[in-house]
Each structure stands twice: as C-alpha cells, then as structure tokens.
Image (cartoon, grey):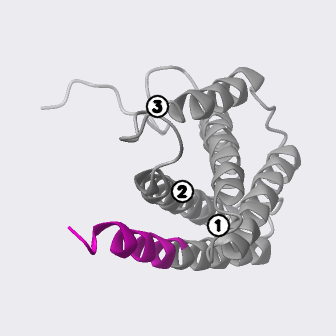
C-alpha cells in the first residue's frame, strides 16, 4: 500500500524550516508589505491633503504607521529578527511603483488616487489576514496578546471600510461623466 515510513513529524515545505522559521519569514514578508503600505498611505494623504478626503487619509496614514510599529513590536516579542533587505526592497518598490503612467504628462491624475486607494485597501486586507493568523497563533503562544490582536483586526476592518468608501467616492467622481 504505502511504502513510506510513518513519522510523527509534521510535514515540511522541503526547506527544512520549522514553524518558528516559517513564522519569521511570514512576519518579515508582512513587514515588507507594511513598509510599502505606510509609504503609499503617507504619499496619498499628502497628495490629497487639501481635498475633502485629506483628513481621513491623514488619520489612516497615521494608523497604518502605528500598525507597522505594532508588527515590529510583535516580532520583537517573538524574537523574530527584521530582515532589512526585505524592508529596503519593499520601500524601493513602492517608490518605483509611483512612476507608472497616469494618462497625464504633468501632474497627478484623479485615476492615480483611485488606483492608490485600491492598492491600500488590498494592503489592509493582507494586514487583516496577518492579524487573524497571529490571533490563531496566540491560542497556543502565550507571548502574544490576543486582546491586542483583536483590536488590531477590528481597526483593519474599519480601515478597509473607510478605504472602500473613499474608493467608491473617487470612482464616482472620475467616471460619472463617462
């Protein structure tokens, strides 16, 4: 039938990495995303500071920055070292991502704001998934504060709703004349 020897060891991904190593990789990947998201949120808030969405975006950018700091604190609590090359690459990729064509030779297109709102919303969705994953880990790892993770998840869900409202508003403004 099955010629494979039986073992009580959990299956691995073939890299020899254990759960702690994989959690470190996972958290560093999310830190890279949080770095790019923080930069994008700050940029968008600055670009739209005089608009009706400006104050809301400024608050969101501050919260996203705080969430990144929370992730760093959690990584420290878990003894997960920061992989600076990942953070640096994410920072640079976010900067390069701003160079995309926006349909205008000079100035900012309203379409740029719409796409950036969509990118931020996707980033916050990913962040919420990370908080959910960590919340699950907290069930068996007493180093993690389940209440803090619940709060972070609730905030991410509020951020998603806010970004969706801003996205819809921006889309309506752009395409109502189409």
Residue 108 percent location from the top left of the image? 52, 47
- In the displayed structure, 81 sits above or below 155; it is above
Secondary structure predominantly adopted by residues drawn in magenta: helix
Residue 130 percent location from the top left of the image? 59, 56
Q: Residues within 10 Å of mark 2 (few under 14, many from 20)?
A: many
Specify the quadrant that holds the N terminus.
top left
Q: Quadrant of residue 33?
A: top right
Q: Residue at x 73, y 78 (%)?
A: 151
Q: Which-is-in-front pick, marks 3 and 2?
A: 2
Distance, label 2 to label 1, CA atoms, is 22 Å
Query: Which residue is labeled 1 in the image?
Result: 135
In the orientation shown, which residue stands out farthest toward the left? 1
Choose the circle earlier in sequence order: 3 or 2: 3
- In the displayed structure, 23 sits above or below 64; it is above
Q: What segment carries the magenta color?
A: 163-178
Q: Secondary structure at mark 2?
A: helix
Query: Which residue is labeled 2 in the image?
Result: 120
């Amino acid at each position: 039938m099955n010629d494979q020897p039986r073992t009580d060891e959990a299956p691995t991904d073939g890299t020899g990495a254990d759960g702690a190593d994989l959690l470190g990789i996972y958290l560093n990947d999310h830190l890279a995303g949080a770095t790019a998201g923080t930069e994008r949120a700050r940029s968008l808030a600055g670009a739209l500071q005089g608009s009706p969405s400006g104050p809301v975006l400024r608050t969101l950018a501050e919260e996203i920055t705080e969430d990144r700091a929370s992730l760093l604190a959690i990584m420290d609590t878990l003894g997960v070292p920061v992989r600076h090359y990942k953070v640096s690459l994410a920072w640079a990729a976010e900067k390069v991502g701003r160079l995309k064509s926006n349909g205008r030779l000079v100035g900012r297109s309203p379409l740029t704001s719409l796409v950036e709102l969509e990118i931020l919303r996707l980033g916050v969705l990913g962040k919420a998934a990370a908080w959910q994953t960590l919340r699950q880990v907290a069930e068996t790892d007493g180093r993690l504060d389940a209440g803090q993770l619940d709060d972070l998840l609730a905030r991410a869900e509020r951020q998603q709703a806010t970004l969706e409202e801003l996205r819809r508003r921006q889309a309506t403004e752009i395409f109502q004349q189409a």
